[in-house]
Image: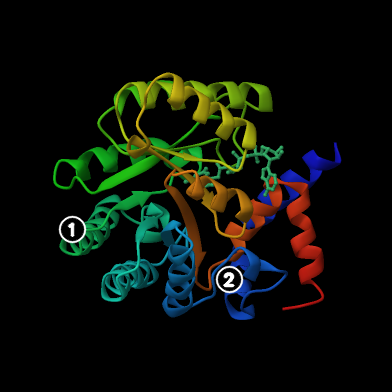
Amino acid sequence: MLANFSKNFFLGVSRNVSLNKAAKKWGLRFGASQVVAGVTIESAIKKVQELNEKGLVCTLDHLGEFVSDRQEAIHATENNVKTLEAICATGVNSHLSVKLTQLGLEIDREFCVQNMKRILDTAKATNNFVRIDMEDYTHCQMTLDILKELRELYDNVGTVIQAYLHRANKDVMDLKSVNLRLVKGAYKESPEVAFQNKGEIDANYLQIIKTHLLSGSYTAIASHDHEIIAKVKQFTNENNIPKDQFEFQMLFGFRKDMQLSLAQEGYTMRVYIPFGDDWFAYFMRRMAERPQNVLFGIKGLFSK
Ligand code: FDA
């Protein structure tokens, strides 16, 4: 019951507009620096370099979401372009992850698509790949429609499917040719659209992972769950699915030992590295996921 209260509390706080605005001025607080790689592109690139040296590849996320101001969306687009340019200039091994609500999806769909095209043109010119993160359910269909439109012009773009959604299996079947990141899902969704129970979510997660792997498509399994990871290893072994058809992904700051051991076993291990001053909603969702993460926050109250 306490876990449920804590989950709902942090997910609620993550959408609080005033707190998100205020947090931009605070700098990283409450221990957020353990899971957010600083506020500048330079600090994030430095983390990528360190992880690359350890045999891990990365994807950078210039934090930001639910933008309601055109100028802010343009600024976010420019920051993403600059991030791709910095990846290219420094020669680090990293993709880019973006959120469509950061690029103006809630302002004007066409404006958001144009911003995405600017980012994808830079990615194409610098030989990189961009993944569109999946946000809450109200944006799911729009995200998939935009992905479809973009994929008519670009092949260096993919997205994410959330296993807690009832529609997940159908979406994975429809997206056979797409490089997908598969996750359990991080937002608070209603029972009408999403499984609420861990057992059901885990079962659906394994189902969509198997479906996508068996269709021969590139699959990114993004989870810190050792049981899921063990089952994926067993399934790929038994079905002779080559290690270059899939990768594991984890968030920066989580299960660092497991990240290293997977890389040492010869799996591609990609670390998702968020950075930037818009860290609050991301950090609150991580607190919601796992009561132990709250310890970051409590310890962080006493240090910056
Ligand atoms: P879950 O939180 O269900 O944990 C299962 C078990 O694993 C726990 O009970 C515990 O035993 C163990 N465990 C988990 N974390 C641990 C830790 N830190 N240390 C020790 N043990 C731990 N979501 C979304 O909606 N849209 C998106 O675009 C993305 N993108 C994304 C990218 C990447 C790289 C990752 C890793 C995750 C996302 N997510 C996401 C978040 C995702 O949907 C999900 O909310 C979290 O990954 C939590 O689910 P897990 O599968 O990690 O395990």
Q: Is residue 79 visible?
A: yes
| Quadrant hosting residue 141 | top left
- Residue 35, percent from left and from top: 61, 63
Query: Which sits in the foreground, 16 or 282?
Result: 282
Vertical comparison of 193 with 102: above or below = above
Residue annotated with mark 2: 21
Which quadrant is home to the C terminus? bottom right
Q: Quadrant of the N terminus?
A: top right
Residue 16, horizontal then vertical, whole percent: 63, 59
Answer left or right for 56 relative to 301: left
- Rendered-image quarter of ligand 1: top right
Tell me what residue is drawn at x 43 percent, y 79 percent.
42
Res. 124 mark: 1
Q: Label 1 neighbourhood size at 10 Å, few (<14), some (14-19), many (20+)? A: some
Mark 1 vs mark 2, CA separation in Å: 33 Å
Dividing the picture into quadrants, the one containing residue 283 is: bottom right
* Mark 2 Cα-neighbour bin, 10 Å: few <14, some 14–19, many ≥20: few
Label at residue 290: none
* Colour setup of the view: rainbow
Mark 1: amino acid: Lys
Residue found 48% across the figure and 23% down from its top: 235
